[in-house]
Image: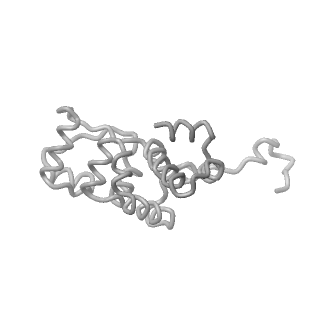
Amino acid sequence: MPIRSDIPATQADSPVIIPGEDLFQPLPVPYSERFERLVEFCETHNSEVLASLPHVAAELADGVGYEALFRFLRLYNGNSIAFAPNHQAFAARYGLALDAARYERLRHLCNGNPAVDIPSGCGMFNALRRVAVQRFLSCTGDPREAARRFGVTRRYLRKLTAQ
């Protein structure tokens, strides 16, 4: 990229970041190939994924599926959302069709709070990556390749395998 003389070098060399761009989002854009692959991974390794997720996310995933959960997380990740009076109103407000029993269990998990804290996309991504790393290590046993493929340190892998 040629440097224009009327723009300082630091601005000319850096890419323009558009607000709302998905470049730094930890969860992929819905209906993209990455999104579909992530949903497929979670469905294939359902029990391990559910065990690794924060309790609110696990309850939602078990109730509405991973595709709906990830779309919901892209909208509300890291936020606190208010409970609706009942599961039908919750479904209308947030687009998650939980049955009445699961909705009450979710309210119970939140200890009667009027709102629920939705896990962050980064936290979810890290939990899912941890499952993927564990699966990779169980299949290959190669920590060096796992570190390279997943962008983690050898120290991270030692702590992960010590658990």
As drawn, 49 above or below 56: below
Point out residue 140 in the picture as x, y percentages from the top left corner: 57, 57
Point out residue 31 in the picture as x, y percentages from the top left corner: 44, 66
Q: In the picture provided, is 46 more to the left or to the right than 29?
A: left
Q: Residue at x 28, y 51 (%)?
A: 60
Q: Nearer the viewer, residue 148 or 24?
A: 148
State which quarter of the image contains the N terminus: bottom right
Q: Residue at x 81, y 41 (%)?
A: 8
Q: Residue at x 35, y 41 (%)?
A: 54
Point out residue 132 in the picture as x, y percentages from the top left corner: 49, 53
Residue 110, by quadrant, is: top left
Q: In the picture provided, is 1 more to the left or to the right than 41?
A: right
Q: Nearer the viewer, residue 51 or 71?
A: 51
Residue 22, by quadrant, is: bottom right
Point out residue 89 in the picture as x, y percentages from the top left corner: 16, 51
Q: In the picture provided, is 157 more to the left or to the right than 119?
A: right
As drawn, 35 above or below 148: below
